[in-house]
Image: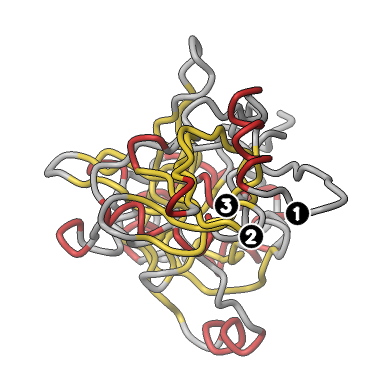
Amino acid sequence: MNAHSLIEMDTIPTLTDLQRMHEDGTKVPFRIVGINEKGFFGKVYEHNAFVPFYRMPFEYSSEEVYALFLKSFAKVIFQANIFMIQMEKEFCILDLKDLKFEPIRLKQGRTYNGTIIYKNRAYLIIEMGALFAWKYGSVTGFLPKSLRDRIIPYDQLEVGDTLPVCVHQVDQTTKTKYLLQGAISSKDWTSDTILELSKRIVPAKVTYRVGRLTLIVDGKHQGQFSSSSKWYKRTKFRYIMTQMIDNLQEGEDIFVKVVGFNKAIQNLEVEWVVDKAREVFYLGDPKNTIADLLKSPVNFPSFED
């Protein structure tokens, strides 16, 4: 890959050697070490070099945005064209505009970490290229205000913030343009966190990601209804519960009990603690409760019927 492959040479080339490479169109390895108001400076072999922002392969709106990625750029060896050599200053000016990167297609429904590089009143632009060490170049997505995760208020999100995002839709023409949704980070999960949550009934907010119901548990953790709990396995209760779940609306508040954790997808597994009014509505008899239903000999229709 052009951005990462390193030229092997027995000796360190001189500036005269670099001049010949420039004339031959040979690319040289460039490692970024710093930034100023006009671009990035670094080393080509042991020689000082500089690339202006407008000759970078990524186009951002300001020096501040480029500076967000200095540390991740510094971990990559870019294959650069020599634009000019200033022999008297022993200095190279480089051009990375025509760098070629491997193609990537982000998967719909998958969550990725990204950095906000632009914000206005209606949407954010998220850069995810650093997640892949720039192997695929700049990988950006469009996150409308209406599809954010609703945990962090929109006015508190700023350029430079990192956040998890879910691929909501992929442009079917280009396959490289992405409409994003907010996602919930669960990096801080520990057994103590789960144990503490499991000791109490906690609030959860209903939301839908790529058409799939997701719960925001206790204001910050992603969760789903457990399909292995006894209350869901019981056929007569499952029919009623499925009706209730299907009728949950975006933004609705409910209460749940944490019963487990799915490590593979970083999700809490929860049981719904159903409110009395909803029980009355679905069961049609205020004398009965969900707990009673589990013990009841009455046979409700199953999915197989």
SS for dot 3: helix
Q: Are marks 1 and 2 in contact (CB under 8 Å)?
A: yes
Q: Write down the residue under mark 1.
A: 12
Q: Nearer the viewer, mark 2 or mark 3?
A: 2
Q: Which residue is rendered at x = 65% and y = 55% of the image?
A: 232
Residue 262: x %, y % from top left: 69, 63
Q: Residues within 10 Å of mark 2 (few under 14, many from 20)?
A: few
Q: Which residue is rendered at x = 52% and y = 25% of the image?
A: 98
Sequence-wise first label, 1 or 3: 1
Q: Nearer the viewer, mark 1 or mark 3?
A: 1
Rendered view: 21 above or below 290: above
In this rendering, position of residue 97 left or right of residue 298:
left
In this rendering, position of residue 2 left or right of residue 213:
right
Sequence-wise first label, 2 or 3: 2
Q: Are marks 1 and 3 in contact (CB under 8 Å)?
A: no
Q: Write down the residue under mark 2.
A: 46
Quadrant for the C terminus, please.
top right
